[in-house]
Amino acid sequence: ENNGQLQIFTTPDGNFIPTVDNQITAYNLTNLGFQFKFSPDDSIIAGANYNSLTLWDGQIGDQLERIGLPNGAVTDIRLSADGAKIVISKNDGPPQINAFGNLSLTIFDVLEKKVISNYKLDQQLNKTGCNTTLPFALTSDGSRIATLTQDCKIGIYDSLTFDELSSFG
């Protein structure tokens, strides 16, 4: 039982059996809605929750950075193939299942340790029925994002400016 903690373990023989002997570190997670992803080279663990993004060393678990984010339930987090960008999908409604709010994507530059762009889908999703999450796909170089447009189509956006490049569907 982890009692609300992120626990990092070693797996020297390839079998994952969490024990005190192979636990590297643990962090208390007091906020709801954490999502975690490893960077493509496994050097960083990115974790986002209701109001922050935290980066940990992927090998020993030391906290590298913690950045405040606008409040909202995290629905997804992904890293670009080169590990340079992190994209976080959030719902600004309360952190409960099926709570409706406006959806947003935040793009974070890992090297610069700062938010580089935000995209907000301003809809009353419980009325439009478009979606209750904001699905997205990131190109391998992190330069473009596919996600929902304001009129519930699929849009391709520049990841730095969120200028819409095209839409369809």
Image (cartoon, rainbow, N blue to C red):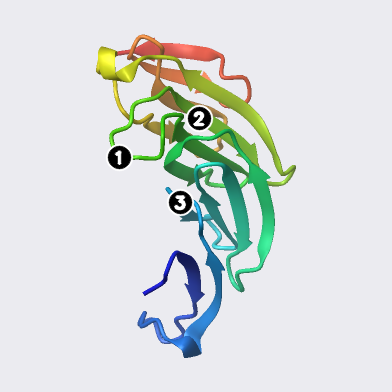
* Label 1 crowd (10 A; few <14 / some 14-19 / many >=20): few
Sooner in the amino-acid sequence: mark 2 or mark 1: 1
Dot 1 or dot 3: first in sequence order is 3
Per the model, the C-alpha gap separating discs 1 and 3 is 13 Å
The residue to which callout 1 is attached is: 97
Mark carried by residue 34: 3
Picture residue at 30% right of the left edge, 39% below the top: 97
State the image coordinates of residue 18 (x, y, percent, origin top left).
40, 81
* Amino acid type at image mark 3: Phe
Is 50 situated left or right of 161 in this image?
A: left
Mark 3 crowdedness (10 Å alpha carbons): few <14, some 14-19, many ≥20 = many
Q: Residue at x 58, y 33 (%)?
A: 70
Residue assigned mark 2: 105
Residue 118 in the image: state x and y as whole percent.
58, 25
Give the label, 2 or 1, closer to the camera: 1
Instruction: Give the residue type at disc 1.
Output: Ile
**Given the current orientation, which residue lies at the most extreme right position?**
112
Look at the picture and state if 1 lies above or below 137.
below
